[in-house]
């Protein structure tokens, strides 16, 4: 749960409304459902990394399907608009606390993820 996350104070100060909403959503879930949700997120990262290693294009249907899964996963916590989702991708690259989650499977994967997220956002989201 976000409340136990080492980044909770930062998230609460940067995005107070979204932080509260996200915590309420998580608290309404059983521990088992929370565990499944976070496992789904980890599996998605691995799948994106696999696509990156296999040199799939960020714009490919396969990768964009994975990004849709990621967007839906993020939307459980907070539903970003186009600019926010692109910004999240940039944060994955610029903040090593996040890039490590992608790059541990394949160096450069965070940048690939951000590129794929930008494509997804441009094609599917509005502000």
Image (cartoon, grey):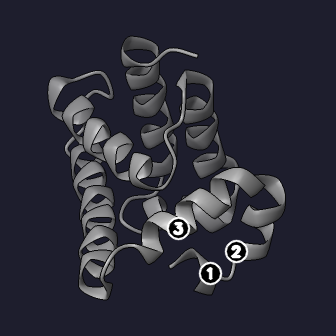
How far apart in space, not on screen, are marks 2 and 1 (Cα)? 6 Å
Report which quarter residue 99 is drawn in.
Answer: bottom right
Q: Which residue position is annotated with label 2? A: 8
Q: Is residue 59 above or below residue 73?
A: above
Q: Position of residue 82 (x, y in %)?
A: 54, 23
Real-space Cα separation, disc 1 to disc 3, in angstroms: 10 Å
Callout 2 touching callout 1 (CB < 8 Å): yes
**Residue 45's mark?**
none
Residue 88 in view: yes
Q: Secondary structure at mark 1?
A: helix
> Would you place residue 75 above or below residue 116 in this image?
below
Q: Is residue 5 above or below residue 75?
A: below
Question: In front: 90, or 125?
Answer: 125
Residue found farthest to the right: 13
Q: Nearer the viewer, mark 1 or mark 3?
A: 3
Instruction: Mark 2 and mark 3 in contact? Answer it, CB < 8 Å.
Output: no
Q: Earlier in the sequence, mark 1 or mark 3?
A: 1
Residue 55 located left or right of residue 102: left
Q: Which mark is residue 24?
A: 3
**Place of residue 108 in the rendered image (x, y in percent of width and height, measured from the top left):** 48, 49
- Residue at label 1? 3
Residue at 44% of width from left, 59% of height from top? Answer: 102
């Amino acid at each position: 749960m976000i409340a136990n996350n080492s980044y909770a104070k930062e998230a609460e100060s940067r995005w107070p409304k979204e932080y509260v909403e996200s915590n309420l959503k998580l608290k309404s879930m059983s521990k088992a459902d929370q565990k499944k949700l976070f496992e789904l997120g980890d599996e998605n990262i691995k799948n994106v990394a696999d696509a990156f290693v296999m040199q799939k294009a960020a714009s490919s249907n396969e990768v964009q399907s994975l990004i849709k899964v990621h967007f839906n996963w993020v939307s459980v916590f907070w539903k970003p608009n186009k600019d926010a989702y692109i910004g999240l991708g940039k944060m994955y690259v610029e903040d090593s606390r996040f890039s490590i989650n992608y790059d541990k499977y394949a160096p450069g994967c965070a940048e690939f993820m951000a590129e794929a997220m930008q494509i997804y956002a441009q094609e599917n989201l509005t502000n």
